Image (cartoon, rainbow, N blue to C red):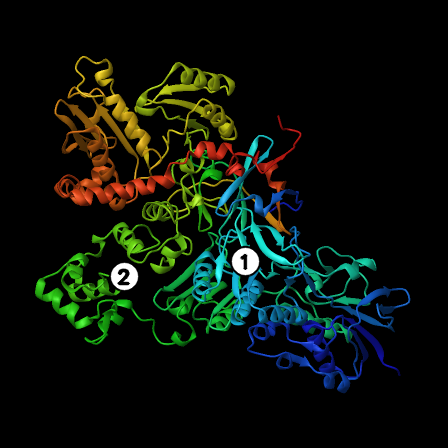
Amino acid sequence: MSKKKLVVVGNGMAPGRMLEHLFEKDADAYDVTIFNAEPRVNYNRLMLSPVLSGEKTYEDIITHGDDWYAEHGVTLHKAARVSGIDRDAKTVTSENGITASYDKLVIATGSNPFIIPLPGKDLDGVLTYRDLDDVDKMLDAAGRGGRAIVIGGGLLGLEAAAGLKMQGMDVTVLHLMPTLMERQLDPAAGFLLEEEFRSRSIDVRTKANSHEIVDDGSGKVKAIRLDDGTEIEASIVVMAVGIRPSADLAKSIGLDTNRGVLVGDDMRTSDPDIFALGECVEHRGMCYGLVAPLYEMAEAIADNLLDGTAEYTGSVTATKLKVTGVDLYSAGDFAEGDDREEIVLRDASAGVYKRLVLKDNKIIGAVLYGETSDGPWFFDMLKKGTDVSEMRETLIFGQAYQGGAPLDPTAAVAALPDDAEICGCNGICKGKIVSTIKEKGLTTLDGVRAHTKASNSCGTCTGLVEQLMQVTLGDAYNPAAVTPMCGCTPLGHDEVRRLIKSKELKSIPAVMQELEWTSSGGCAKCRPALNYYLVSDWPDEYADDYQSRFINERVHANIQKDGTYSVVPRMWGGMTSSKELRAIADVVDKFDIPAVKCTGGQRIDMLGIKKEDLPAVWADLGKAGFVSGQAYAKGLRTVKTCVGTDWCRFGTQDSTGLGVKLEKFMWGSWTPAKLKMAVSGCPRNCAEATCKDIGIICVDSGYEIHFAGAAGLDIKGTEVLGLVKTEDEAIEHVAALAQMYREQGRYLERIYKWAKRIGVDEIRRQIMDDANMRKAYFDRFVFSQKFAQVDPWSERVSGKDKHEFKPMAVLTKEAAE
Amino acid sequence: MTADIHNWVQIGTLDDIPREGARCVKNGDMTIAVFRTAKDEVFALEDKCPHKNGPLSQGIVHDGCVTCPLHNWVISLETGSAQGADEGRTTAFPVRLEDGSVLIDLSFSHEAV
């Protein structure tokens, strides 16, 4: 009996594996013919990156050499792209005129690299990263030097970038999303990866949207221009932004296709004699671009070709970045959800980040960075659905730590020898800390820091030091002395602020990684605080994190109880004019604003505005010269004034004028909590400056500066900072004071609480007595204002964040109004 | 999940929603808040906090939850239930992502309206 005929279209890794299974099960069932568009035998595509980086050669990565085809009687047509399939006649024909007939056909056409339809995409020097030809082209370009730009910070793009760098090119990676490999990694791991690439002198630009590939005049790549106008020179551009299932052939012969060739669990297409396999396939709505699922499909097809009943039911996938020296592993689903728990381990000094996501005591996702040897172990448990509740305490430490009773952390510290180093920064060992605690009778962490210097630098050993205190002092130690910022960290606000500065942390993911946050992405308490600290400490370098702002600061208006907003335009020093009032009146009429009210800070509040109307309201107010009053901000809100010498018979100075100057100088500045000021023209204090955060009382001899008053949850008169003679001095002192508070205040800590904590005398000493210090605070305030004085309203009117104000969709429904 | 009849409606693309943010979808009189987490998961809740009807779409998104902008109740994006000591629940709608498109199942909304 003659053998049945099997034709395979495509010669990638998946059909290679399928044939291995097939021959293993029954070597004599089929005569096999393969059409391969590439002019070569089968090779391991996963190993292209080592070929690009020069660590391997093409010969090293061949999986099925010519001998193998010969040995199994397989007819391989190289460089034979299939042009047509006749399903009635059951024949396959290639472009170069070869025809083969089949009983069963397997379509394994793989995928094509996605080309972004940028202007210039067809220029000479624009490459993709998909097969050996692409690698050859890149190697050829690298031989000539220059800069390579890789578009796409995913798996392939990063591998290409690392390879090209190793080949001696300058490399820039452009990535549209805020963090690298965002589909496989959470932001913390993405951040580490970015740091690693930077340390290899690979330029990484996230949130980078390419606009055009620039022609050098002869049809060759010269540069890339980004949406923001930046131009980066390049001799080649590699597009590695993703792949698309190559389903055109299947579609052209009438098979059901969607994104990919549609197959059922038996891997058959809509034609029972035709199977499809690999990256060209769409199975249960999924298309796969990783090798493991393709191998599982290959096994199922091999069985079904032999009249078996194997079913492929989908895959969970794991990813590993193949860049030498970078250990990164990601598997499963690591999204957040309230039925999920996460275990996070961060070891900043070792550059290790591990995160496991559990659901019902089973691992459903894992991200490992820096130390990935347990990846397969976690992945195995993930696939098997192993119940991990027994080993939960030590699970994150990996397989080596399983077995034996879980160690109580305090017991572990107690068991350490006296010469065990606790604080690596200062070289302090356990014995020294314990003896100092006993000798000096220390009971607080600050005391231990002061006397031993342990935990006084990077702070990562703070937990260990506290455990030592616990062991040494027993119940006499009250660890609650430092209130943690939130549940995501044991560190207090001051600690975090100090470390942001000393470790030069300049993004929220950087803070979370370096300070070993225990959650993956923070919470609604720590994120706004971190965002403020970073804005305050790095005004020029830090990019504000919009999603870490409370709604009021995000949409620049006050949310009210019914979800509408109120809008307060700035009226400098409380002064206004008929033109301004008319403009406000017109806006009130035009938008049918239900309530208009004077605020406690002498401004006009328009209440009850629908969110979608906000940009139009601002546009009209902006035309009349108004900017946002920031009545919603943890920042400078108002400077209230009286009429001073302009009109008042008691006024001693131009309090209105000074209020206007202060407000124009200080508006836009962010502070730990809201900041309200006032200037009164005489001690009668009509502007009520003595219950403000910062107040000035004008007197005959000059300006008395007050601060730390409150008229909110607490009612408190101000403290006197001191008396100065001129307006300029008053402004300098006030700004320096505000800056000192900005740099030291804990988020949401009003100035009066901060002053109580620091001590009024100390503040007075630094601002009034130490002219150099005052000048330095003042200069930092002025520097920060360069970046802060941007009116958020006009920004939004000109289109920024416009998605905020429009619904994503309006669904029509009979019941709709 | 009792509804056998699904009413999947396409409402836009994943890119329309800011990461760790939300967009609103108007469904007749009802507003549905569609959230996108840091991990690009998408969830939909009626845009009303079970506490005092605060617009959840305007809250800070974190760890599979959103914190209501009015009084800081923390609501699970997946179930719509209040977290911690608070009690209450808002309607959660099934959402699915297809090729970058966001589809929402409105078959529940009839019960909820």
Same chain? Circles 2 and 1: yes
Residue indicated by mark 2 = A458
Residue at the image point whose x is 18% and y is 31% from the top = A706
Q: Is residue A19 visible?
A: yes
Q: Is residue A267 above or below residue A719?
A: below
The quarter of the displayed image where residue A2 is located = bottom right
- Read off the chain for label 2: A
Q: Amino acid at mark 2?
A: Cys
The quarter of the displayed image where residue B69 is located = top left
Q: Amino acid at mark 1?
A: Arg
Residue at the image point whose x is 52% and y is 53% from the top = A177
* Residue A109: image location, x then y, percent: 74, 66
Number of numbered discs visible in the structure rendering: 2
- Foreground disc of the pair 2, 1: 2
Q: Is residue A726 above or below residue A266?
A: above
User: Along the horizontal axis of the image, is A785 left or right of A22?
Assistant: left
The quarter of the displayed image where residue A559 is located = top left
Residue indicated by mark 1 = A183
* Residue B9: image location, x then y, percent: 65, 42
User: Along the horizontal axis of the image, is A613 left or right of A731?
Assistant: right
> Are there few (<14), some (14-19), or many (20+) residues within 10 Å of tag 2?
many
- Read off the chain for label 1: A
Query: Of helix, strand and loop, which one carries label 1?
Result: loop
The residues tagged by marks 2 and 1 sit, at their Cα atoms, a distance apart of 32 Å
Query: Of helix, strand and loop, which one carries label 2?
Result: loop
